[in-house]
Amino acid sequence: MSDDFFSDLGKSISRVTQKAVGRTGELFETTKINAQISGEQREIEKLYAKIGAIVYRKILNGTMEVDDDIASIVDDIRAHAGQLASRRKALAGVKRMRVCPACGELIATDVAFCPKCGTPVVVDPPAVPEKTEDGEDDDWTETEE
C-alpha cells in the first residue's frame, strides 16, 4: 500500500511539474511575442515621424501644398520650435554657453566650430571689465583677512 501511495505521489508531482514547465514555456513565448509586437510598433512610430519630417520640410521649401488639417499642425510645430529655441537660449545663458546657429546644440563660448555638426561659429571676445568713474575696474573680488 505504501508503494501505491509513493507511486501516486510521484505521478502527481510529475503532472504538476509538466504543467509548470508548460506554463513557463507559454509565459516565455507570450513575453517574447509581446516584445516583438512592441518593437514593431516602435518602428512604425519612427516611420510616421520620418514621413512627418519629410512632409514638414517640403512644406517649408514650398514644394508641397498644404491642406487645412496639416496647416494647423505646421503652425503648432513652428510655435513649439520657437519656444524650444527660446528655452535653449535661456539655458545657454544660465550655463554661460551659447547655441549653435545650425543644429541648436549648446556649445562653449570659446570654440570656433560646433562639436556636434561642425558649423563654424564666431568666437566671442573675452569680457573686459568696465571702468568706474574713479578709473578702477568694476570687476573686483574680496580678499580674505
Image (tube, helix red, strand yellow):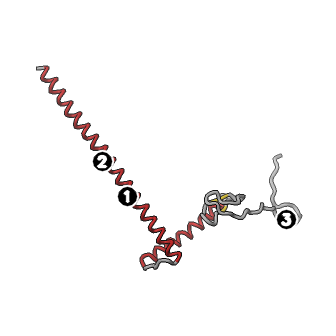
Which residue occupies 69% across, 64% down? Answer: 121
Note whether 88 is above or below 66 in the view shown.
above
The residue most toward the right is: 134
Could you classify mark 3 by the number of other residues whose Cα lies within 10 Å: few (under 14), some (14-19), or many (20 or more)?
few
Q: Which residue is mark 2?
A: 30
Residue 41 has which mark? 1
Percent x, y for residue 130? 82, 64
- What separation in Å lies between label 2 and label 3 (alpha carbons)? 75 Å
Mark positioned earlier in the residue sequence (2 or 3): 2
The outermost residue toward the top is 2
Residue that label 3 marks: 132
Which of pointers 3 and 1 indicates the residue nearer the eye? 1
Picture residue at 12% right of the left edge, 23% below the top: 4
- Say what secondary structure mark 3 lies in: loop
Amino acid type of disc 1? Gln
Q: Where residue 77 sits: x, y (%)?
A: 50, 71
Query: Which is nearer the N-term, disc 3 or disc 1?
Result: 1
Asked whether 87 or 110 is in front, the reply is: 110
